[in-house]
Image (cartoon, coloured by chain):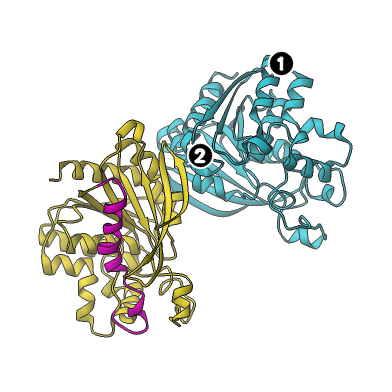
Chain colours: A yellow, B cyan
């Protein structure tokens, strides 16, 4: 593990690391915030995984969301990984990026799945990376209380957070999302990504669809929080939170869906409500066994 | 005036505008945050001008500093201009950028002076832009109380804030800075910029040197706040706040200089202490006549 940067902020430490990933067969980057030791001691601390949206790296969240202020106050660790495999290893193995050079597939668009189709299957294994390899590193190298782990994210990362929570509710005990993709099997972003990463058989897509998971597997014990801007340009075509809301009603899933008037899809929206999300997770995780 | 973007954040509005600048003879951009009307009404509000550092545009501060949260709570407008003339007009007139392509002169490095030397004098008139043209637009188009105007900034922008305040204490009634250049006539960044923009005669530089201004003109009535990170790589070579501190002592200038252990020159440092600065200005401006 190599330290790429280490900066003091709000009394804590914001760092970025790189390491040779087995799951993705390339160097991967992730960011970690640890809270101030002089206030909170040396831990272990509750830990939150933040999954970013399309086009993001590990950098967007840590520079724009303003989460460190609240995490420093509450005493929480936040881990923010990159959104796809990236770098020279990928190019050397002749894995093409999206042939159209689009933003919604390939680099920056891993969709938190384990790809099964060539050529993506070699590197695009973000599901295993996020749920196995990364937590193993974090729990070994950082002062986190693994029994108090939560997950949240934005857009494609909200999809990642919801699906990973619903498939691993005992590991990720709290879950929230900003403007998540809740039904990727039936919206353009998801159809493009899942058909390329997983192939044409739509039955295989269902295990990466939050709404399908809720219907098939039933509710988790968590109370999920979703914030969605009403002025979000992707609301009606790609996000459709009402689909997940209906499935939650049916499955008995505790869900608070807040439709925020005037807010768009940007980090200005995330920054506005990040404090609510951190306090929501902190409350849930401090009650967790 | 053209609206380039308009986004809701923390209940207020963060916008970016462009306009044809007379002072800089090119299109200039500036960002404006206005606080939530449902909490604070329609104004007029106290207004703060933020001056950014080397390499920045109007974008860095509004996406990274986290100021909107506090400005929304306090009910303040924040104006963040670009740091130099920029764009096609500059290139068409064959104004070279720094011949070495360096970050510390030319584009992104206007140093808040009115250049007197060719070819800079045509466009590089950031002092007049910031102190005359921009306030005239802001006071005409936005709900600000011009009698409650403050100024603050970072690094080169801290230099801009201190010099503009000291030269115009009745206009800019409150002043603070993060890691400011306080004595540009005697550090490499300042020597390079001022010799090119103003020519070889160092007497002309003094009117853009905060320490010299304090010595020559005397103290302002404001209580100036400066935060400086001790782990800032530029501290000993470019910033040297102790020089200004000594001049303030001598001139009877009220100054609080806080040396912050562990903090560097980045927006992670700014974000940590921005709330203190906004509350500092708000207190001062609410007492202003």
What mark, if any, has residue B269 been given in the picture? 2
Residue B131 placement: quadrant: top right
Please give the name of the residue rendered at 65% of the width and 46% of the height, measured from the top-left corner: B54
Q: Is residue A188 magenta?
A: no
Please tell me which residue is depicted at 27% across the width and 57% down the height of the picture: A135
Q: SS for tag 2?
A: helix
Instruction: Check residue A137 for magenta coloring.
Output: yes
Residue B188: x percent and y percent?
74, 41
Which residue shows up at 71% across the image and 31% down it?
A: B163
Asked if one can make out residue A177 in the rendered structure from this viewpoint, the answer is no
The quarter of the displayed image where residue B128 is located = top right
Residue B136: x percent and y percent?
Answer: 69, 38
Magenta segment's dominant SS is helix
Please report, as a chain letter, where disc 2 is located. B
Q: What stretch is highlighted in magenta?
A: A116-144
Q: Where is residue B213 in the image (x, y as percent from the top left)?
A: 76, 25
Task: Give whichever of A232, A181 is nearer the camera.
Answer: A181
Task: Identify the residue shown where x is 41% and y is 74%.
Answer: A106
The residue under label 1 is B251
Q: The residue tagged with tag 1: helix, strand or loop?
A: helix
Q: How many numbered badges does the structure rendering display?
A: 2
The x and y percentages for residue B74 are 45, 30
Position of A61 with respect to B100 (left or right) is left
């Amino acid at each position: 593990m190599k330290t790429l940067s280490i900066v003091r902020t709000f009394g804590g430490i914001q760092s970025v690391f790189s390491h040779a990933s087995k799951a993705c067969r390339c160097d991967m980057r992730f960011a970690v915030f640890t809270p101030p030791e002089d206030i909170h001691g040396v831990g272990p601390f509750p830990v939150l995984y933040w999954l970013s949206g399309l086009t993001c790296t590990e950098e967007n969240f840590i520079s724009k969301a303003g989460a460190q202020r609240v995490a420093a106050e509450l005493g929480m660790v936040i881990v923010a990984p990159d959104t796809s495999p990236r770098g020279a290893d990928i190019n050397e193995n002749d894995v093409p990026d999206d042939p159209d050079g689009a933003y919604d597939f390939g680099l920056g668009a891993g969709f938190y799945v384990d790809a099964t189709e060539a050529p993506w299957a070699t590197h695009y294994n973000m599901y295993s990376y996020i749920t196995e390899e990364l937590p193993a590193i974090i729990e070994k190298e950082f002062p986190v209380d693994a029994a108090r782990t939560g997950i949240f994210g934005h857009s494609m990362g909200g999809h990642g957070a919801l699906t990973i929570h619903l498939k691993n509710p005992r590991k990720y005990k709290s879950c929230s999302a900003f403007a998540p993709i809740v039904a990727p099997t039936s919206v353009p972003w998801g159809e493009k990504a899942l058909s390329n990463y997983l192939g044409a058989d739509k039955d295989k897509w269902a295990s990466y669809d939050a709404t399908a998971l809720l219907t098939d597997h039933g509710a988790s014990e968590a109370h999920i929080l979703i914030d969605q801007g009403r002025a979000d340009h992707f609301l009606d075509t790609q996000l459709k939170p009402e689909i997940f809301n209906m499935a939650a009603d049916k499955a008995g899933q505790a869900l608070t869906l807040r439709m925020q008037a005037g807010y768009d899809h940007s980090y200005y929206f995330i920054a506005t409500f990040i404090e609510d999300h951190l306090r929501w997770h902190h409350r849930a995780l401090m009650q967790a066994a």
